[in-house]
Amino acid sequence: MNKSMVGGIVVGVVIATAGGVIAGYNLLGPGAEPTHAEVLNVSEVRETIQTPREVCQDVQVTRQKPVKDENQIIGSVAGAVIGGVLGNQVGGGSGKKVATVAGAAAGGYAGNKAQERIQSNSTYVTTETRCETVTDSREELRGYDVTYRLGDVEKTIHMDHDPGNRIPVVDGQLVLNNQ
């Protein structure tokens, strides 16, 4: 390569570079409107939606049978009669009377407690429907919070879509419609 050719290349590069700088200054220099805002950050905005619903199921339930003799009178009377008969078999004379009365009292108490125990164990099983409210949760995307820089100013706006790396600007205003 000769010197004039190298010199021509250097002069050509300098002229092209200077032309690019001048064109850039004219396009983006003082008073030039930016065509895009730079997106600095995009954050999804989500909302938790809770939906209640009723869930029912059949369950086995053990119930106490209704008691016809709440005071256990039948057990008390039967126990007193049996106790009195057995007490009458013991002793003689006035001791026999005391044994009969004591047997009747003890038999009445024992009969009462026996009937109470029988009644408390008298149950039946039935099926009942039991319901409860449960809440289903799901996340829904509600939009995007976008932080951008336009010139020297940083701002944040809410958008319905992700704008990407930059937002178009026309007459100094962001163009926010879906692209």
Image (cartoon, grey):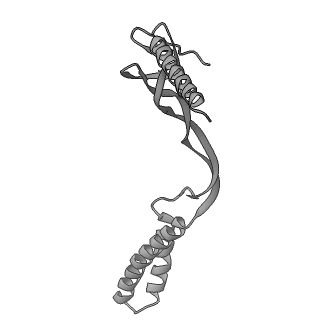
Locate residue 32 relative to residue 143 in the image: left or right: left
**Residue at x 54% of width, y 21% of height:** 16
Q: Viewer-proximal residue, 47 or 72?
A: 47
Note whether 90 is above or below 113 in the view shown.
below
From the top left corner, tell me how far across and down residue 102 is, in percent. Answer: 37, 81
Note whether 41 is above or below 16 in the view shown.
below
User: Exactly how many numbered labels are in the figure?
Assistant: 0
Using the rendered image of the protein, determine whether residue 121 is visible from the camera's viewpoint: yes
In terms of image quadrants, where is residue 40? top left
**Residue at x 46% of width, y 80% of height:** 83
Note whether 113 is above or below 71 in the view shown.
below
From the top left corner, tell me how far across and down residue 167 is, in percent. Answer: 52, 20
Note whether 145 is above or below 123 in the view shown.
above
Using the rendered image of the protein, determine whether residue 163 is visible from the camera's viewpoint: no
**Residue at x 45% of width, y 76% of height:** 110
From the top left corner, tell me how far across and down residue 67 is, in percent. Answer: 53, 58
In terms of image quadrants, where is residue 2? top right
Locate residue 94 relative to residue 64 in the image: left or right: left
Q: Viewer-proximal residue, 73 or 70?
A: 70
Q: Viewer-proximal residue, 79 or 135?
A: 135
Quarter of the image with the N terminus in it? top right
Q: Residue furthest bottom?
A: 91
From the top left corner, tell me how far across and down residue 153 is, in percent. Answer: 36, 20
**Residue at x 53% of width, y 13% of height:** 175
Quarter of the image with the C terminus in it? top right
